[in-house]
Image: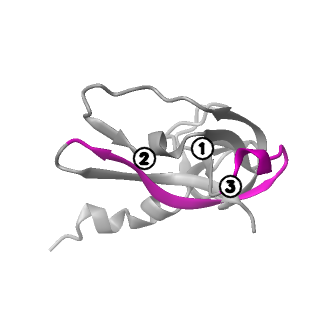
Amino acid sequence: MAIPRYWRNTQHYYNLIGSKCKKCGRVYFPQRSVCADDDSAELEEHPLSREGKILTFTVLRTSLSDPSKENTDVIVSEMPLVLAIIELEKGVNVTAPIIECEPEDIKIGSKVEAVFRKIMEKGEKGILGYSYKFRLMR
């Protein structure tokens, strides 16, 4: 009996997994299958640090409406929303929300850590989506 795909992929659901070129060493996130530097298809999974620093950020104070009520995004209920570009390791940046703090508390260079949270609930069936967000290091 085969192991269900969900179980095989659990590390991807709760960790930041990138890919690293075996030839040149460049790291990518999200994962990719071909290196942009040397066209090599020899990439391997590369776990990324859950810690990083804020390179830049913006504060969103209004949200887009959804008149159909098809998407109930958790993000909409978290206004104002802070979106940041975060450097995880040299050359690997990710854009993500900063949570569990006031916008005034966030500074460029602040240390942050990844956490996994619900990001949406879709339609009447209540399909849930989870993703990474970041919070200031304590």
Q: Is residue 11 visible?
A: yes
Sequence order check, earlier mark of 1 and 3 = 1
Q: Nearer the viewer, mark 1 or mark 2?
A: 2
In 3D space, how far apart are the residues under numbered discs 1 and 3 (Cα atoms)?
14 Å
Residue 16 % position (x, y): 56, 57
Is 102 displayed left or right of 127 in the figure?
right
Report the magenta residues as a range: 101-123
In 3D space, how far apart are the residues under numbered discs 1 and 2 (Cα atoms)?
14 Å
Q: Which mark is residue 32?
A: none
Query: How is the protein colored in the picture?
Result: one colour
| Residue type at the position of mark 3 | Cys
Q: Which mark is residue 96?
A: 1
- Residue sitting at 26 percent across and 33 percent down? 69
Residue 37 % position (x, y): 67, 32
Q: Nearer the viewer, mark 1 or mark 3?
A: 3
Residue 95: which quarter of the image?
top right
Is residue 110 on the magenta stretch?
yes
Q: Is residue 90 visible?
A: no
**Marks 1 and 3 in Cβ contact (< 8 Å):** no
**113 or 125, nearer to the observer:** 125
- Say few, some or many: other residues with alpha carbon within 10 Å of mark 1 (under 14 / 14 to 19 / 20 or more): some
Q: Mark 3 — residue?
A: 101
In 3D space, how far apart are the residues under numbered discs 2 and 3 (Cα atoms)?
16 Å
Quarter of the image where the N terminus is located: bottom left
Residue 8: which quarter of the image?
bottom left
The count of marks equals: 3
Is 64 displayed left or right of 58 in the figure?
left
Give the secondary structure at mark 3: loop
Give the secondary structure at mark 2: helix
| Residue type at the position of mark 2 | Val
**48 or 61, nearer to the observer:** 61
Q: Mark 2 — residue?
A: 74
